[in-house]
C-alpha cells in the first residue's frame, strides 16, 4: 500500500516472511493481507513524522482491514484506500472479530517474529479472548496502531551488526503493565517525550556511507 512512498524494501528474511505469510493466510481461508511500509532502499531514518523504526529492513506494517473483493487492487486503490481505524478516541470502543485474532495469532506464531506492536486497546481485547495463547506474549502494546499492526523480526543470522530487541518480559502482558497504557500519563504523553520519540535512535556509523551515496 502507498507504493509512491517507496517504503517497500526489506531484508530478504522479511521478504520471505511476507511471502510465506501470504500462503499461510490463504491456506487458513482468511482474506488477502495488505502490506504497508517496510523500509527505504538503504534503510535509515524515514522523513520526519513517518516512522521512528523501520530503519533496518526487519520491520513491516500490516493492515487489519482486508479486502473482500478482488485480491488484486488497482494502483489508485493502493494509493488512496483509507485504512479504517479499529480503535476510537474512547479506548473502550474496539471493532474486533475472531478473524483478526486468528490473523495476529498466525503472524505472532512464526518463529522469525520477535514481537508484534498493537494498539493498547487491541492488546486488552486479546487478553480477553485469547488468554493462554502461547503467542500472546509477543503481542506488545504501543501508541497508535489503531489501523495496522507492526511486525518486527528477530535479527537475521547473516547480520552480525543487528542489535536484538531486549527480551520480552515474563508473562503474557495482561497485567499492571497493560493497565498503565490507559492512565492519564500514557494517553497524554508530554510533548517533550513525543519529540524525543520522533527523533529516533542514532544512526550507526557503519550506515552513514550508504545513506550519503
Image (tube, helix red, strand yellow):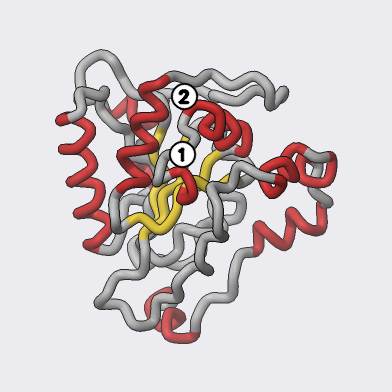
Nearest the viewer among 56 and 172 is 172
Q: Which sits earlier in the primary sequence, circle 1 or circle 2? A: 2
Q: Residues within 10 Å of mark 1 (few under 14, many from 20)?
A: few
Tag in front: 1 or 2: 1
Q: Residue at x 38, y 78 (%)?
A: 210
Outermost residue, bottom direction? 205
Q: Residue at x 47, y 36 (%)?
A: 148
Q: Is residue 141 above or below residue 127?
A: below
Q: Residue at x 56, y 60 (%)?
A: 169
Marks 1 and 2 close (CB-CB < 8 Å): no
Residue 2 visible, this orientation? no
Relative image position of residue 147 (x, y in whole percent): 51, 31
Q: How many marks?
A: 2
Which residue is tagged 2?
Answer: 82
Q: State which quarter of the image contains the C terminus.
A: bottom left
Q: Which mark is residue 132?
A: 1
Relative image position of residue 84 (x, y in whole percent): 50, 22
Q: State which quarter of the image contains the N terminus.
A: top left
Q: Measure the alpha-carbon separation of dots 1 and 2.
A: 34 Å
Q: Secondary structure at mark 1?
A: loop
Q: Residue at x 28, y 63 (%)?
A: 11
Amino acid at each position: 500500500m502507498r507504493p509512491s512512498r517507496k517504503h517497500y524494501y526489506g531484508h530478504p528474511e522479511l521478504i520471505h516472511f511476507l511471502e510465506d505469510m501470504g500462503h499461510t493466510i490463504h491456506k487458513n481461508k482468511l482474506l488477502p493481507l495488505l502490506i504497508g511500509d517496510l523500509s527505504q532502499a538503504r534503510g535509515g531514518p524515514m522523513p520526519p513524522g513517518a516512522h521512528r523504526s523501520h530503519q533496518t529492513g526487519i520491520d513491516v506494517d500490516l493492515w487489519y482491514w482486508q479486502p473482500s473483493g478482488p485480491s488484486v487492487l488497482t494502483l489508485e486503490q493502493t494509493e488512496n484506500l483509507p485504512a479504517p481505524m479499529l480503535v476510537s478516541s474512547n479506548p473502550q470502543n474496539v471493532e474486533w472479530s475472531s478473524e483478526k485474532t486468528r490473523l495476529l495469532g498466525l503472524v505472532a506464531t512464526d518463529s522469525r517474529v520477535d514481537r508484534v506492536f498493537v494498539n493498547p486497546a487491541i492488546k486488552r481485547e486479546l487478553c480477553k479472548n485469547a488468554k493462554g495463547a502461547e503467542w500472546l506474549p509477543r503481542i506488545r502494546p504501543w501508541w497508535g496502531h489503531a489501523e495496522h499492526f507492526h511486525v518486527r523480526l528477530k535479527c537475521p543470522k547473516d547480520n552480525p551488526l543487528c542489535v536484538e530487541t531486549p527480551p520480552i518480559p515474563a508473562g503474557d502482558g495482561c497485567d499492571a503493565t497493560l493497565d498503565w497504557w490507559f492512565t492519564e500519563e500514557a494517553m497524554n504523553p508530554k510533548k517533550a517525550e513525543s519529540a524525543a520519540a520522533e527523533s529516533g535512535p542514532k544512526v550507526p556509523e557503519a550506515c552513514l556511507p550508504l545513506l550519503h551515496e
